[in-house]
Image (cartoon, rainbow, N blue to C red):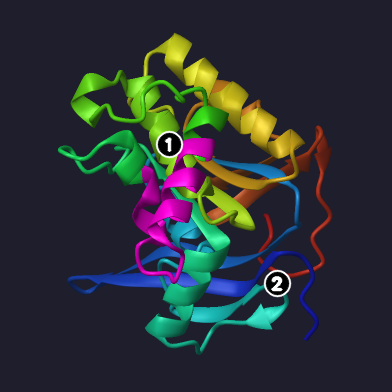
Amino acid sequence: MKNHGLIALQNVFKTYQLGESTIHAINSVSLAIEKGEFVAVIGPSGSGKSTLMHICSLLDNPSSGTITFEGVDTTNFSEEQLAHIRNQKVGFVFQQFNLLPRTSALENVQLPLLYTDITRHERQQRARDMLAGVGLGDRLNNTPSQLSGGQQQRVAIARALINNPEVIFADEPTGNLDTKSGREIMDLMTDLHREGKTIVLVTHESEVAAFAKRIISMRDGKIVSDRKDGKKVHLKNKGGGR
C-alpha cells in the first residue's frame, strides 16, 4: 500500500471497553495530511477529534489500522521510536499550556532540548529567538504567574517550535483565553502557516476552525466532512466519510 502525505491514516480504529460495551472513539478513519497544510479538526465533545489528534501525533496507538509519518509505517514502532519522532518532528500546544509554574519563560521553552546534545548556550539562544518570534522577547525571565493567559500560550507555542518540528498539533489552543487573546493566538498560527509550518488544530469552535485552509468535521468517531478551501476533499480510502 502506498501512503502519501506527511501523515497518513489507513482504516484506523480506536476502541475502548466500557463494561460490556465497546466504544469506537475512532471508527474506520482514513486520511492524509500534506506537508504545509493548515488543518482544523472540529466536532462536538466526544466526537473523537482529540483522539484522532493523539493518534496522528503518535501520542497514542490505534487499536487497528496503519499510520505512516513521512512515508514510514509507524504502526509497530516501539515507544522509544515513537518518542524520538515526537521529540524531533512534532510540536505540541495544549489548552492548559502545561508550563512549569516556578520556571521562567526562557527555561520553559528550552525543555524539549534538555535531552539533546545541544550546548546550554545554544539552548538559551534558541529559546530567546523563539520567544522574540512570538512577541515575548521582553518577558524571558517571567514565570507563568507573571504572564497573561495569551502570553502563556505564546510561551507554549515557542516551546513547540524550539526543535523546528515538521508539524504542530494544537488541541483547543484558545480554549482558556478571552476573545482578544484567542484571536492573537490564531493570528500567530496563521503566520506560522504562511512561513511553511504544517498545523493540525483541534477545536469545537467554528470561528477558530475558520482560520484553517482545510476543515475536517467529526461525529461519533467518524469523519463526516472534509473540505479544503470550501471544496470537498476526495478520499480514495474507505472510512473517510459517510
Q: Residue at x 75, y 56 (%)?
A: 35
- Above-or-below relation of 211 to 40: above
Residue closest to the eye, 183 or 241: 183
Looking at the rendered image, the quarter that the C terminus falls into is bottom right
Q: Which residues are magenta?
A: 109-129
The first of marks 1 and 2 along the sequence is 2
| Local secondary structure at mark 2 | loop
Q: Residue at x 35, y 39 (%)?
A: 106
- For the residue marked with disc 2, what is the amino acid? Glu
Q: CA distance from mark 1 to mark 2?
A: 25 Å
Looking at the rendered image, the quarter that the N terminus falls into is bottom right
Where does residue 45 sit, x and y in percent of width and height? Answer: 38, 40
- Above-or-below relation of 240 to 62: above
Q: Which disc is residue 70 wearing? A: 2
Q: Point out the frontmost of discs 1 and 2.
A: 2
Judge the density around disc 1: few (<14), some (14-19), many (≥20) Cα neighbours within 10 Å.
some
| Local secondary structure at mark 1 | loop
Q: Residue at x 48, y 67 (%)?
A: 86
For residue 189, side relative to residue 194 (left or right): left
Where does residue 116 sit, x and y in percent of width and height? Answer: 42, 69
Q: Which disc is residue 172 wearing? A: 1
Judge the density around disc 2: few (<14), some (14-19), many (≥20) Cα neighbours within 10 Å.
some
Where does residue 109 sit, x and y in percent of width and height? Answer: 39, 44
Q: Residue at x 71, y 69 (%)?
A: 238
**What is the quadrant of residue 167 in the picture?**
bottom right
